Image (cartoon, grey):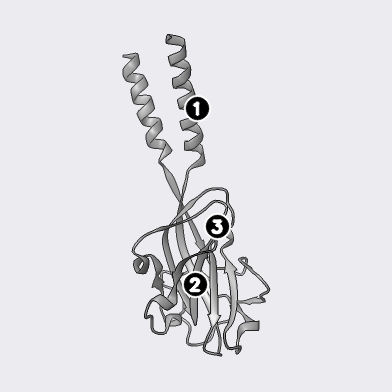
Amino acid sequence: MRVLNLMLGAALLSMTASMAHAVPFMSSLGDECVGCELSDQTVDTYIDPTGTPLDGAAWIQDFDSWWVDNAEYRIWEEDLNMTGTDAIITSLYVSYDDTLMIKSKGETVFNSEDYSIAAPWTQAINVLDLLGESFIVAGDGRLNFWVTNSENFATGVIWKGEASVPEPGTLALLGMGLLGLGAARLRRA
């Protein structure tokens, strides 16, 4: 009976270790931009996020990039900024004007120029549908959005998504359970 209880306990601990919780994230004026002056002013042609997968997120623009051909700026998602825990991106919707690259730790995850997306500022684009898979943001990395104003007019970006991260409490519980199993085996020996 003790062996059965021990095996059931180990199985329970193993299952709880794989538990994760979803962390929602979205663009806001609280996100960081290098050398940018951020605003949530939108122009009439941009998608209204209300009632779309982008609902609740804010358009972010760098006013210094408006009306400047090929001006580029970078914004990163503050909720996924060097958290110390790897995060699997399980949902990501974007809208942008004019081109967008999504990077993490210097690696390009998504480049809008690889896809034929007409008027991306008028729609909520499912990045994971285009990529065909989820991707990971390392715990020592961040999720960066690089925007280029290639049309010499207004420019901006908006995003909303969800990341799956391991539940810290279950990892601690697994560790304690494994220590207990080891101690129980030592007592028997």
Residue at horizontal 49 percent and vertical 75 percent from the top: 100
Residue marked by disc 1:
176
**Measured from the top left, where is residue 32 in percent x and y?**
63, 66
Q: Nearer the observer, disc 3 or disc 2?
A: 2
Residue at horizontal 51 percent and vertical 40 percent from the top: 168
Q: Amino acid at mark 1?
A: Met
Q: Amino acid at mark 2?
A: Met
Q: Earlier in the sequence, mark 3 or mark 2?
A: 3
Q: Earlier in the sequence, mark 3 or mark 1?
A: 3
Q: Nearer the viewer, residue 85 or 108?
A: 108
**Measured from the top left, where is residue 129 in percent x and y?**
34, 67
- Disc 2 packing (10 Å; few <14; some 14–19; many ≥20): some
**Measured from the top left, where is residue 45 in percent x and y?**
47, 87
Secondary structure under tag 2 reads: strand
Please tell me whether residue 34 is drawn above or below residue 140 in the rendered image: below
Residue marked by disc 2:
101
Quarter of the image for residue 70 reads bottom right
- Disc 3 packing (10 Å; few <14; some 14–19; many ≥20): many
Q: Nearer the viewer, residue 24 or 14?
A: 14
Secondary structure under tag 1 reads: helix
Quarter of the image for residue 109 reads bottom left
Residue marked by disc 3:
80
Relative side of 73 to 176, left or right: right
Q: Dots 3 and 2: beta carbons under 8 Å?
A: no
Q: Amino acid at mark 3?
A: Leu
Q: Dots 3 and 1: beta carbons under 8 Å?
A: no
Please tell me whether residue 164 is drawn above or below residue 181 in the rendered image: below
